[in-house]
Structure formats: C-alpha cells, structure tokens
Image (cartoon, rainbow, N blue to C red):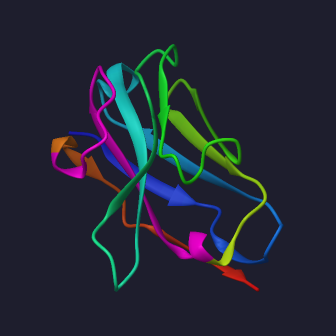
Amino acid sequence: QVLLAESGGGLVQAGGSLRLSCAASGRTASTYAMGWFRQTPEKEREFVAAISWNGASTNYADSVKGRFTISKDNDNMYLQMNSLKPEDTAVYYCAARPWSVRVHHGEYDYWGQGTRVTVSS
C-alpha cells in the first residue's frame, strides 16, 4: 500500500509559478514511479508528467514541455510549474505505480486526493 498526499496548489496569475509536492508513504514507496495528472469537469484525466522510481527517466505532456519540471527526492515528488496559463487550471493528482513510467492514468495503482490549481488571466 502506498499513500499519497499532494500539496502546493492555489490561485496564481497567468505567467506565474507554483510548486506542487506529493509525499508518498509505504514500505515500497521508493521503488515506485510517480506521475502527475490533471482533470477538469470538461475533460478526462490527462497526463502531465511522470518520473521513474530512481529519477533517471522523465516524460512530459507536450502541453507542458519547457514550462513544467518534475523531480523526485526519495519518497517525495515535485512539479515545478512556470509560465502558467489559464488552460493549466485543473485539479492536479499525484499517482504511483511500480518501477517504470507510464502515461495512461489506468496504469497507475495509487492516487492522492488532488490539489486545485487555478490560473487567472
């Protein structure tokens, strides 16, 4: 069992920055790949970024490349979000799966409760 808890969401103006954090707990949390997904009422949950269990491999959605950076430190994961746009507004979820990175939400076993990010224009 892996428990995930997100933090760091909030309201920011377009062009601003936020840093999301995800704290993982559980006996094997350090061997899990972790990812960020986001969801709005109008859209299905979509992939944002993911990082392998050892931090050696990362993957980003095209919509956030060059603006967002994912990182991992033992059992914690971070998403540095720069140059935020109104279309980044969503609830952001942290997810975990064993070992390797995947981009589809159905391949992740554990989920946090989500943290809301609102970007005003």
Q: Quadrant of the N terminus?
A: top left
Q: Position of residue 2 (x, y in %)?
A: 28, 40
| The residue stretch that appears in magenta | 87-106
The residue under the point 24% across, 51% down is 105
- The answer to whether 25 appears left or right of 20 in the picture is left
* Residue 3 position (above or below residue 13): above
- The answer to whether 74 appears left or right of 107 in the picture is right
- Residue 8 versus residue 17: which sits nearer the camera? 17
Q: Position of residue 42 (x, y in %)?
A: 34, 84
* Residue 11 position (above or below residue 52): below
- The answer to whether 4 appears left or right of 84 in the picture is left
The residue under the point 83% across, 66% down is 16
* Residue 90 position (above or below residue 67): below
- Please give the count of numbered marks on the rendered protein: 0
Q: Residue 101 sits in which quadrant? A: top left
Q: Residue 103 sits in which quadrant? A: top left
The residue under the point 79% across, 60% down is 17
Q: Is residue 77 magenta?
A: no
- The answer to whether 97 appears left or right of 29 in the picture is left
Q: Position of residue 121 (x, y in %)?
A: 76, 86
Q: Position of residue 48 (x, y in %)?
A: 46, 50
Q: Is residue 97 magenta?
A: yes
